[in-house]
Amino acid sequence: MRKKKIPLRRCVACNESKSKKELIRVVKNKDGIINVDLTGKMNGRGAYICSSIECLNKAKKSKRLDRALDIQIPDEIYDNLNEIINVDQK
């Protein structure tokens, strides 16, 4: 019996490869709308970030999410990510 392969993705902030389930996905759809995708099923270009405040701050400061998705990320998305991470860590 073959073991199912776990999909790995790389965090844009720390460059660590982790399983998809451990990371938060940020998606830009074809209309240029940015969303936080907790299901991992939304259509569009995705970038992943660890669920840690350090990675979020690093990504925001260095604009790594902006570069990965080739668009200016609005502050609401960072605020949304911050809330999700704070809930995860409780």
Image (cartoon, rainbow, N blue to C red):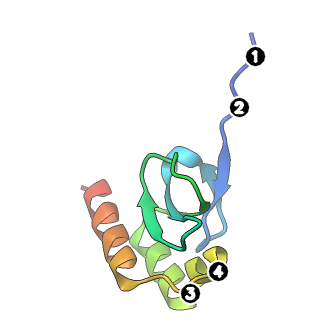
Looking at numbered disc 4 in the image, what kind of residue is underneath it? Answer: Asp
**Foreground pick, 14 / 64:** 64
Q: Contact, CB < 8 Å: mark 3 with mark 1?
A: no
Q: Upstream in the sequence, badge 3 or badge 1?
A: 1
Q: Is residue 54 above or below residue 52?
A: below
Locate the N terminus by quadrant.
Answer: top right
Task: Give the secondary structure at mark 2.
Answer: loop
What residue sits right under mark 3 in the picture?
63
Give the alpha-carbon distance from disc 2 to disc 1, as whole Å: 9 Å
Q: Quadrant of residue 74?
A: bottom left
Report the side of 30 relative to 21 (left or right).
right
What residue sits right under mark 1 in the picture?
2
Q: Residues within 10 Å of mark 1 (few under 14, many from 20)?
A: few
Q: Position of residue 32 (x, y in %)?
A: 54, 74
Looking at numbered disc 3 in the image, what kind of residue is underneath it? Answer: Lys
What residue sits right under mark 4 in the picture?
70
Looking at numbered disc 2 in the image, what kind of residue is underneath it? Answer: Lys
Task: Give the secondary structure at mark 3.
Answer: loop
Looking at numbered disc 1 in the image, what kind of residue is underneath it? Answer: Arg
Residue 51 seen from this side: no
Q: Quadrant of residue 78?
A: bottom left
